[in-house]
Image (spheres, grey):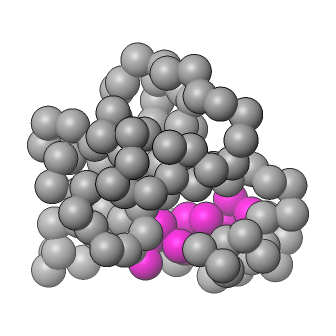
Amino acid sequence: MKQLLAIDRTEAFLFAPLQGETAAEILTGSLAPLQGTQGLLLIENYQSTERKLFCGTRALLRAFWLSGGLWRVPGIFSFLPSLPSSKHRHHYPLRIPMRPGPDERFLP
């Protein structure tokens, strides 16, 4: 997370603990096991109905891509096909009704 805070100059990313209220609302149904994840989860388009969830290394690479500038170079790897060895190494398209969130970057 420290890396993301350092590269996020426009403060575009919001942060929430995986054991918090925000994660409990978003990670439901088949995504519920991800609440116990120790790694990084990135939810792209958080305040949209077209959310995408990225896990682990793919989440970090996607964050690099979204940060822009020279960070897009390593971020290109977020577009490579996932390795079949892990069921959480791909993005999950989510169709969840929009939940208005607070303006702060750190969510409950």
Residue at 42% across, 39% down: 22
- Residue farthest along the top direction in this orientation: 97
The residue closer to the viewer here, 66 or 46, is 46
Residue 5 falls in image quadrant: bottom right
Q: Is residue 74 above or below residue 67?
A: below
Position of 70 with respect to 47 (left or right) is: right
Q: Which residues are magenta?
A: 57-67
Name the side, left or right, on which 89 lies relative to 16.
left
Horizontally, is 104 left or right of 25 in the view? right
Image label count: 0
Q: Nearer the viewer, residue 101 or 7?
A: 101
Depth check: 73 or 50 in front? 50
Q: Residue at x 20, y 46 (%)?
A: 31
| Res 54 visible | no
**Is 102 situated above or below 17?**
above
Q: Position of residue 36 (x, y in %)?
A: 22, 63
95 versus 53 height, above or below:
above
Residue 92 seen by the camera: yes
Instruction: Work out whether 35 lies above or below 3.
Output: above
Q: Which residue is rendered at x = 57% and y = 21% of the image?
A: 100
Report which quarter residue 3 is drawn in.
bottom right
Q: Which image quadrant is residue 64 in? A: bottom right
What predominant SS class does the magenta segment belong to?
A: helix
Q: Quadrant of the N terminus?
A: bottom right
Q: Residue 100 magenta-drawn?
A: no
In depth, the one of 19 and 41 nearer the eye is 19
**Where is residue 56 drawn, in percent x and y?**
38, 73
Q: Residue at x 34, y 26 (%)?
A: 95
Task: Name the spot of residue 2 as percent of width and height, x first.
Answer: 66, 79
